[in-house]
Amino acid sequence: MKSILDILSGIETEFLKGNTDVISLIKLDHRKVDALCEHYQELDSVAEKDDVLEQIILELSLHTTAEEELIYSLVDSQDHCHTNEAFEEHHVVKLLLAELRKMSASEDRTDAKVKVLAELVEHHVKEEESKVLPKLKGLDVNLDELGQAFSNRKEQLKKPQNLVQPVEGQSEKASKAPAKRKATPRRSTASKPAGKTAASKIKATKAPTRKTASTKTKTIVAKAKTRAAKSKNRKAS
Ligand SMILES: [Fe+2]
Ligand SMILES: [Fe+2]
């Protein structure tokens, strides 16, 4: 049986082929999550499933937050309707992730919840790749610089001080409350000290702000936004 790392690095080598533009990087993330969800459904061992589930939660949490901050904010001025829909789909994804963080594959509903998550993500990815991402090409933005900013932001979000946004509608107080564990904790987290696993680092306990982005990332995104605004003005005139 392949390890999670083998699966992810195999997809990266096969799919990316040296491309560094933001559209390729986003699509790579999509393929990774799809492969992880498929892998999860094929496994029998609860311990292995829990490890894959943790990776799915990590990948999706980083991806959705970086995408909302850097990509949707740019495309929104061009296509508010589709970005609004994408934000809503992310919202539902985050609700499912919040529930899955407290669950183990040993529980009856977990497989079904992961399946529903995979179907939701599949639908979202289809629309995003066909309706949202192509808009970036019409914005006169440097897609390689934006790709760098996207990767940088995801790396930043892995740090404990830059935790992912709470689910929209969740109060700050609620978002800071520690996640309740089920009676049967997931093996992968039970065997590791609290706060040490990658997924636990990004549990929704504090909303990040744009201030947490590095100066370099902020500069790249500011330049992209300026170019996008100029591009929009040119088209309007
Ligand atoms: Fe995406
Ligand atoms: Fe998305």
Image (cartoon, helix red, strand yellow):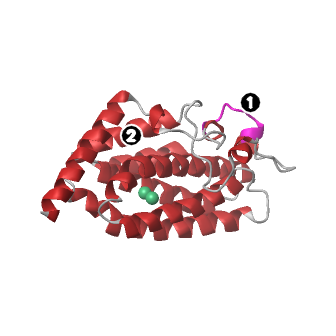
Residue 77 locus on image (x, y percent) = 32, 59
Q: Residue at x 28, y 47 (%)?
A: 225
Whether residue 11 is in magenta: the answer is no
**Is 211 left, or right, of 21 in this rendering?**
right
Range drawn in magenta: 189-198
Q: Residue at x 36, y 28 (%)?
A: 215
Mark 1 element type: loop
Relative height, residue 154 to residue 67 (above, below): above
Relative height, residue 49 to residue 88 (above, below): above
Which residue is tagged 1? 193
As drawn, the label of residue 86 is none
Residue 103 locus on image (x, y percent) = 75, 54
Mark 2 neighbour class, 10 Å CA radius: few under 14, some 14 to 19, many 20 or more? many
Which residue is tagged 2? 151
Q: Residue at x 58, y 30 (%)?
A: 161
Q: Quadrant of ligand 2?
A: bottom left
**Is 13 left, or right, of 96 in this rendering?**
left
**Is 57 left, or right, of 101 in this rendering?**
left
The quarter of the displayed image where residue 219 is located: top left
Q: Nearer the viewer, residue 236 or 25?
A: 236
Q: Residue at x 69, y 68 (%)?
A: 112
The quarter of the displayed image where residue 27 is located: bottom left
Q: CA distance from mark 2 to mark 1?
A: 27 Å
Residue 176 locus on image (x, y percent) = 71, 41
- Disc 2 under 8 Å from ligand 1? The reply is no
Does residue 18 show up? no
Relative height, residue 145 to residue 102 (above, below): above
Question: What is the three-letter code of the residue carrying label 1?
Answer: Pro
Q: Main secondary structure of the magenta part?
A: loop
Question: What is the three-letter code of the residue carrying label 2?
Answer: Ser
Point out the image quarter for the C terminus.
bottom left
